[in-house]
Image (spheres, grey):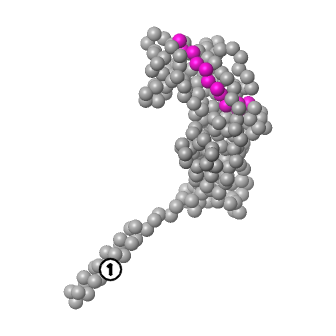
């Protein structure tokens, strides 16, 4: 009887261990994989997506990592499968790509991306720094505001987040030169009425913490947003405003 109990307890222990080491169900069962070619520079990319289903609508984004070429985009929400999916691939180095899947019923579980290099447009500016600010301790932040995204997602009222573009050092006198992506000449963006805007700010060079938003000196209203254009004439002058 004692031997029987020992065998029974050992069996229970092994069975429990087997259950606990089972692999969890991967999100890929309800996801679409996006694959970048291995010769693509994935630095600074962002994948925006919008899914709809019985749960309503849901939008979010995935930021890429250096030398990582595979990403999963969820096609479910709150345990419910999505019916539609829209994707936007942003990059400072490649032209924008969009995908519109009106139904996911027969959609393949992977997307093989083919990207085209984008052009850049030179932009020059100057930040008027107070005596308390040291240019050597600051970096210029450049972000993109894709207003046309709401049109593509067919959302009459949506909040568009900032797409990080680059961070660069300032010269001692606050001047800077940066090559902006040619979003105004992008094939996809050109099909919409709105090319979007660039937004500028200052961050701490060491921590990367955002410190100031930049306001155009000659613009008394709003902040220093620059419309994406094919060319930029003259040097733009900015004034720092504390980040709230």
Is 160 included in the stretch rendered in magenta? Answer: no
Q: Residue at the front extreme?
A: 39
The N terminus: image quadrant:
bottom left
- Where residue 238 sits in the image (x, y, percent)? 59, 16
Q: Height in image: 232 above or below 91? A: above
- Where residue 18 sits in the image (x, y, percent)? 39, 72
The residue singled out by tag 1 in the image is 11
Q: Can residue 221 be seen in this view?
A: no
The residue positioned 71% from the left and 32% from the top of the image is 119
- The mark total stands at 1
Q: Height in image: 195 above or below 24? A: above
Q: Residue at the left extreme?
A: 2
Q: Height in image: 155 above or below 215? A: below
Q: Nearer the viewer, residue 159 or 88?
A: 88
Q: Circle 1 sits in a helix, a strand or a loop, which is it? A: helix
Relative side of 3 to 112, left or right: left
Q: Is residue 191 visible?
A: yes
Q: In which quarter of the image is residue 206?
A: top left
Q: Residue at the top extreme?
A: 131
The residue positioned 70% from the left and 60% from the top of the image is 107
Q: Nearer the viewer, residue 155 or 40?
A: 40
- Where residue 97 sits in the image (x, y, percent)? 70, 43
Q: Quadrant of residue 237?
A: top right
Q: How crowded is mark 1: few (under 14 residues within 10 Å), some or many (20 or more)?
A: few
Q: Nearer the viewer, residue 65 or 41?
A: 41
- Where residue 66 sits in the image (x, y, percent)? 54, 43
Q: In which quarter of the image is residue 197?
A: top right
- Give the magenta-colored segment's residue range: 173-184
The residue positioned 63% from the left and 31% from the top of the image is 144
Q: Height in image: 69 above or below 207? A: below
């Amino acid at each position: 009887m004692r031997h029987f109990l020992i065998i029974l307890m050992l069996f229970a222990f092994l069975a429990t261990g087997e259950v606990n080491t089972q692999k969890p169900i991967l999100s890929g069962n309800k996801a679409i994989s996006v694959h970048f070619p291995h010769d693509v520079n994935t630095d600074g990319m962002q994948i925006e997506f919008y899914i709809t289903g019985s749960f309503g609508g849901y939008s979010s984004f995935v930021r890429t990592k250096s030398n990582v070429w595979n990403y999963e985009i969820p096609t479910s929400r709150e345990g419910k499968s999505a019916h539609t999916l829209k994707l936007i691939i942003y990059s400072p180095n490649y032209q924008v790509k969009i995908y519109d899947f009106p139904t996911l019923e027969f959609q393949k579980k992977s997307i093989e991306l083919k990207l085209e290099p984008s052009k850049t447009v030179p932009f020059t500016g100057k930040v008027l720094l107070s005596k308390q600010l040291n240019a050597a301790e600051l970096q210029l932040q450049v972000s993109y505001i894709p207003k046309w995204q709401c049109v593509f997602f067919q959302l009459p009222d949506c909040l568009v987040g900032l797409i990080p573009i680059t961070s660069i050092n300032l010269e001692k006198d606050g001047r800077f030169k940066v090559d902006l992506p040619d979003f105004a000449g992008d094939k996809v963006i050109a099909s919409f009425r709105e090319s979007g805007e660039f937004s500028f700010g200052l961050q701490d060079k060491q921590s990367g913490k955002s410190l100031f938003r930049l306001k155009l000196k000659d613009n008394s209203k709003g902040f220093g947003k620059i419309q994406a254009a094919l060319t930029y004439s003259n040097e733009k002058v900015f004034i720092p405003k504390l980040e709230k």
